[in-house]
Amino acid sequence: MNLRFLSTLGLALMTSVSFAQQKPATKAPAAKTALATLPSGTKLIEKVTKQPGQLVIPYEKYVLPNGLTLVVAEDHSDPLVHVDVTYHVGSAREQIGKSGFAHFFEHMMFQGSDHVGDQQHFKLVTAAGGTLNGSTTTDRTNYFETLPSNQLETGLWLEADRMGFLLDAVSQKKFEIQRSTVKNERGQRVDNTPYGQSQEYLIRTMFPYGHPYSWSPIGYLEDLDRSDVNDLKNFFLRWYGPNNATLTVGGDVKPAEVVKMVEKYFGPIKRGPAVPVQKLPAPVLAQDRYVSYSDNIRFPMLQMWFPTVPQGHPDAVALDALADILGGGKTSLLYKNLVKNQKTVQAQAYQQNYELAGALTITALPLPGKALDSTEYIIRNTLKEFETRGVNDGDVQRFKAQTEAQVINALASVQGKVSLLAANQTFYGNPNYLTVEMKELKALTKADVQRVYDKYVRGKHAVILSVLPKTGGVAAAKPDNFTVDKSGYKAPDYGYAGLKYVKPIDTFDRSKQPAAGANPVVKVPALYQETLPNGLKIVGTKNTEIPAITMRLTIRGGHRLEQAMPAKAGLAQLTASMLNEGSEKYTGEQFTTELDKLGSRVLVNAGDNETTVYVQSLTKNLPATMALLEQRLLHPRFDAADFARVKKQQIELIANFANQPAVVADLTYNRLVYGSNNIAGTAVAGTTTSVGSIALDDVKSFYNTYYAPNVSYLVAVGDVDQATLDKQLGFLKNWAKKDVTIPADMAGVQPDKTTVYFVNKPGAAQSEIRVGYLTDMKYDATGAYYKAGLANFLLGGAFNSRINLNLRENKGYTYGANSGFRGTRYAGPFTAQAGVRADATAASVKEFMSEIQNYQNGISDEELAFLQTSVGQSDALKYETGQQKAGFLSRLVEYDLQPTYVNQQTDILKNLKKEDVQAIAKQYLPADKMYIVVVGDDKQLPTLQALGYPVVQLDMEGKPVAAEIMKMPMPAPTQMAAPTDEKMKKQFDDGGKIKTKTKKGKN
């Protein structure tokens, strides 16, 4: 069911290359008679308007003569537009031996086209004040931009150019660079991530050999290695025609104007080959299939996949509800039987629907020492318990309420609306399928849920995956009993033969970027504010775009309060976790039940400098949600059994840090920059020793001492006015004022000279790098901190920054590299960071330091102009969603700002000079006095030592290792060569080799 697509709590295994949770067509939709045909031949297919009492996104749908479907959603709530081009092709159109093409091609689509220069797509959109990205799934690939509304034509021009004029700009050089980038992405998301390979084991065990779901969208390295540029060009010619695409435009637009622009830029592009509907039978399991593998993990994992249905099937919504009952949270059976009694740190169930198939998934992570066979036994007994228990009215009511709230909240942004329209058109031929889904949801019954359990789970076979720690000591649930059967496989004929590249013929000069219209007028949200007698500040703004309210209560202090009690580090987080359990009126499970009935959220979280209570509610449920907030905030239960479980979970979380290279890098870096005497150098979660020493009375004392209204403020955004909100917040007036002292800032430990600190992670596919130091800058909206942030935009803040272009786009060392200044009420660090492929570790450190040092030489006029236009035009995107508005209001209160500070920032930006940026770089980028942290395989130590910096090896806790370990042969600097893929060594199309020389002022 497509409603899962809307959830911001997605359960996908990978971010940009995960399985899409979107509605496919089970059959080709019936053709609709055009409402009108324009002189150009473009047909208006349908026009959907708002209906009373119905959740609907108004839009107009057109089809151009070349087959391109255009959906336009007019929405003037914010001065911005979102453009989405979705091609109905993903990894499911690949074949054995050529996996990863769809995702690889997504990367190539950002590398320039006939009229857009190399690496200019990101630069032009960013310069226009917008954001952009792309994503690949099993079933579709999409490219999208959010822009100020005056930049719409530029967005359409860019998308049309790569649809119609890409292939001549594809070079062997670009191909090799992006192949390396994709390998880095796989290393970061799959090979260097705990459980990262689990999806691959599951799908190749579930689906027959050669089935298009039997490999993941990111593909295999060996397939990427054997592909060539001609393979990629054929992929484009076969699948990237306008007749296999949906262009969706939403926001501050007029449909008639959009149609004219689309006809101009997309109309001349020729129709591509026809794309037949793909349909395959569901996998059939004759027995349970057991598979296993070992990974660098602390917690073993058991995962079960039961084959179910593709999206569009009538049973999809009932399966979603079933998964929620089995393992959807604290009210679920799996939580009760596995998490509540401390047998696992996590247990959940969810239904995954794809275009060609589906699976009901059960996942459990036992605590160390717990066996996987016993975990499977408990899961199977839980299913038997469900058979006895059945489905009750409350189960269905909670599922409906949660799903309705997810849908409404997902429509808060124009991107959310456009993405849903695009997905429903692509997979169902009906942008308005949301109304159908809501009818399905409303009609759902207990009998439906019971029926799908009986049909797809009761007595049915599953794929059972065991992921085992490499340290040993844990056996698989059962021995592996499945091997892939390759017999009978026949490679599909997708029609690649005889494809020809035919460029569009234009009647205008496409090489000229469209001129932007007048800058949209961006209004800072009008706000109301008051301060209660107990000192609690309340700030709000009304917004009626969706019938929902977002609130954020900030209680100053958080982890920083532990400065006075470092032996109890982690206490702030443990206290927040306890508030998320029960209250005086409800147990933890009962509290969750009450929230689920409303589709609301009340969540407490401790951070570095504050504890935050996040509240989300539909307008109609605000009174009931506020009653639950009162219980959670002012009447915590502090149950001893809850405490024992939550404390154990936090200790296990901390112990698991060692299995996550990125976390190890962050922790090591923070210890160095803040020093041993500053609590900021310790993780918010604490240490195993400090959390182990915390008693329930410590939690009660922390709550009673530091949770106070006079160090707090509440921001409210959404469909509620001040008078109505005041009536709901009366309980906060009774919150007792307290004498709370917030610790002052402490100076960090500044390095005498740049030094490398190395932490060994044996066998790591990538190395995590952190470079920086602790500045003396606190957050300042119009002072040195703001100006330093502007200066960093060019160094490492934008995609087209010097650091990212060098390490990712020019060298192919990383999936992404960035830098930035961080500051709050406390001084924060400057940090440059990346995860890089292992053999590029030393070379990457060298490039980081070179870019930081060279930045002191100044920037070019072009770079300054790019900075000013990019940041200056981005205001339209800053205040769109409830979350964004809440963040803006929080900033006003936290730093005692007036809303007009944004005007001051505009003036600072306009008057910024190259000399200002250079002065900031010289003052705040001391390349000779920085910490360099590297977490990776110690095979990289010799080349790191060859860089000439002192090298200190640390253990996982930040302590120096024995000195003799460092007595390793040091090669002469000339022995260290920059790494290259084997294929990057050969000649390119233009007869030259990759050039990576950096010119002064730009890359």
Image (tube, grey):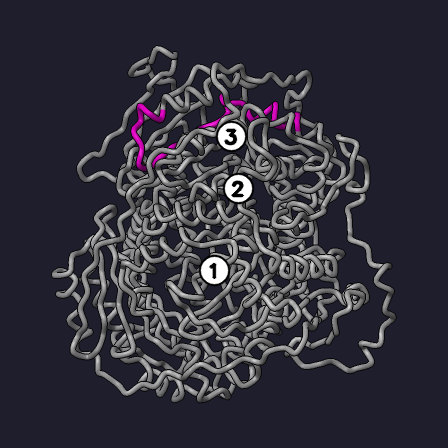
Q: What is the x, y in percent for residue 212?
A: 61, 35
| Image quadrant where residue 376 sits | bottom right
How many numbered marks have been drawn onto this rendered protein structure?
Answer: 3
Give the CA separation, mark 1 to mark 3. 40 Å
- Between 537 and 400, the residue placed more toward the observer is 537
Q: Where on the picture, by quarter, is residue 516?
A: top left
Which mark, residue 825?
A: none
The amino acid type found where label 1 is placed reads Gly
270 versus 817 height, above or below: above
User: Upstream in the sequence, badge 1 or badge 2?
Assistant: 2
The residue that disc 3 covers is: 88
**Residue highlighted by disc 1:** 789
**Any part of residue 550 in sight:** yes
Q: Please give the name of the residue rendered at 41% of the width and 83% of the height, measured from the top-left corner.
A: 744
- CA separation, marks 1 and 2? 20 Å
Quickly name the residue at label 2. 122
Above or below, comparing residue 215 to residue 271 in the picture? below
Bounds of the magenta segment: 233-258
